[in-house]
Amino acid sequence: MSKRTEEQEPRPHLGHKVQRLREVLGMKQAVLARATGMSQQNASKLEQSETIPDQTLERLAKGLGVTAGFIRRFDEEEAVRHLQQHILATCATSSHHAIDKAVALFEQLLQLEKEKMKLLTRVHQDILALAEQLHALEKEQPLDRGGEGNRN
């Protein structure tokens, strides 16, 4: 092997990149073929081709809703790593927010319970005070339970 060949990076297989992007997007090969105006057989052959002419790659990219440059730069392993990092960050943030929200709700509940206890204590004290007042009134003015109200 010549030194020039050894230094070259392996050429990306554009057809495989198109296929993986299509699969990631949940698109059937027939749908991509229709979107690009080609036959499904032609789309299948292109997905098996290491190289794809620029104009054809542009058509495929448009059918996938991406750019040809995106297809050329697409690295599945890098995309998976990026998604994993995003998911981990989102989960950590989401669970942190969920915990914060639960703590805030618990604090609100605790405050409401404290206010309820104060209110119940006041109501209880008011009832006791009314009972004492009623008892005092009964001592001052005994109720006539059979006198004037029962005339026949």
Image (cartoon, rainbow, N blue to C red):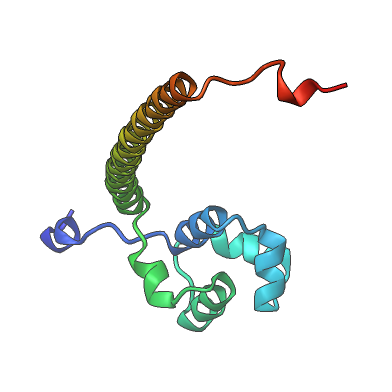
Residue found at x 65% / y 67%: 32
Rendered view: 31 above or below 53: above
Give the number of callouts.
Answer: 0
Residue found at x 43% / y 76%: 68
Residue found at x 30% / y 46%: 97
Rendered view: 121 above or below 79: above
The location of residue 81, given as percent across then percent down, is: 29, 47
The location of residue 55, given as percent across then percent down, is: 51, 84
- Residue in the foreground of this view, choosing between 66 and 19: 66
The location of residue 102, given as percent across then percent down, is: 34, 38
Rendered view: 139 above or below 4: above
The location of residue 148, given as percent across then percent down, is: 72, 24
- Residue in the foreground of this view, choosing between 74 and 152: 152
Asked which quadrant contains residue 130, the reply is top left
Left or right: 2, with 43 as reference point: left
Asked which quadrant contains residue 150, the reply is top right
Residue found at x 41% / y 32%: 123
Left or right: 13, with 62 as reference point: left
Left or right: 59, with 108 as reference point: right
